Amino acid sequence: MTRNEEMKVKLSVEGIDAMQIKVGKLAEILKEAKTLADELASMEIEIKTKD
């Protein structure tokens, strides 16, 4: 078979909108987690001992 044929298919995927919203929320949470991790990594800790 050497011919190229075009076929049109209608497709419905349920739940894709909810999935996109959750992916967006996850991306925001991951950005916040990275920011917090960077802040923690750059913090200086001072340890004092009692005499």
Image (cartoon, rainbow, N blue to C red):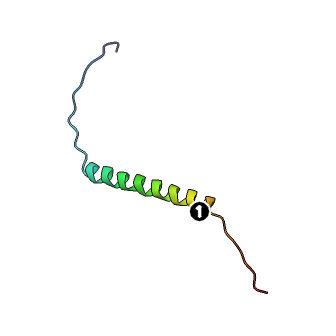
| Image location of residue 25, percent across then percent down | 36, 56
Residue 9 placement: quadrant: top left
Which quadrant would the N terminus be assigned to in this image?
A: top left
Q: What residue is at 32 percent from the left and 49 percent from the top?
A: 20
- Structural crowding at the residue carrying mark 1, measured as other residues with C-alpha within 10 Å and reported as few (<14), some (14–19) or many (≥20): few
Q: Is residue 7 above or below residue 27?
A: above
50, 42: nearer the viewer? 50
Which quadrant of the structure image shows residue 41?
Answer: bottom right
> Percent x, y for residue 17?
26, 50
Q: In this image, 40 relative to 4: left or right? A: right
**Residue occupying the point 51% across, 56% down:** 35
Amino acid marked by disc 1: Leu
User: Which one is nearer the viewer's eye here, 39 or 46?
Assistant: 46
Q: Secondary structure at mark 1?
A: helix
Q: Nearer the viewer, residue 32 or 19?
A: 32
Image location of residue 7, percent across then percent down? 24, 25
Q: Is residue 43 left or right of residue 12?
A: right
Residue lying furthest right = 51
Residue with the mark numbered 1 = 40
